Amino acid sequence: MESRPTLTAYIVVSDAKAAIELYKQAFGATERSVMFVPGTEKVMNAQLNLGDSLLMLNDEFPEHGVVAPAPGVVLPVTFHLQVEDVDTKFAQAVAAGLEVVMPLEDQFWGDRYGQLKDRFGYRWSMASTIADPLTEPAI
């Protein structure tokens, strides 16, 4: 049995199969496992590796109170990806269909940082460290 990180994000999406493909294209996620409700194409649980982290997701099950974010609702959470080459990874995510919320810029805290939003309502930030703000200015 594979181990899991101590904290794992688990999200609900309106179309889990599409979300899995989007996260593969946008972030280079790989499938760890996908379980379907028996006899259906409805995703009961999917586990994706993103670097050394795990993202779990499933389709909606409104009969159990499990629903995806409503369209247009701004969620009070952002998933952050710390990457080696943020310019390349950010462009990859945009090419996969994510919307730029905050363009990439060198930030005073030492990261080159930007934010994106996927079509399922989730916000993603991406950054690469470019300077140590305690010892050298980032901008």
Image: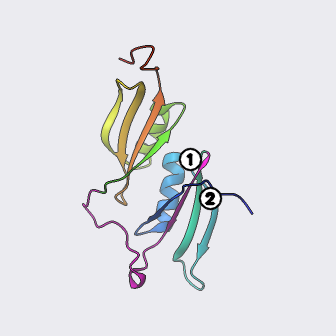
Residue for point 30% across, 38% down: 102
Residue type, numbered disc 2: Glu
- Name the quarter where the C terminus is drawn: top left
The residue located at (31%, 57%) in the rendering is 75
Whether the magenta-drawn stretch holds residue 46 is answered as no
Residue 57 falls inside the magenta stretch: yes
Q: Which residue is mark 1?
A: 28
- Secondary structure of the residue carrying tag 1 is loop
Could you tell me residue 103's position as x and y percent?
32, 35
Helix, strand or loop at label 2? It is strand
Q: Residue at x 47, y 22 (%)?
A: 130
Residue under pointer 2: 31
Where 38 falls versus 46 (above or below)? below
Lateral position of residue 48 relative to residue 104, left or right = right
Residue 18 drawn at (x, y percent):
47, 63
Crowdedness near tag 1: few (<14), some (14–19) or many (≥20) residues, C-alpha within 10 Å: some
Residue 10, image x and y in percent? 49, 62
Q: Amino acid at mark 1?
A: Gly
Q: Which residues are magenta?
A: 52-74
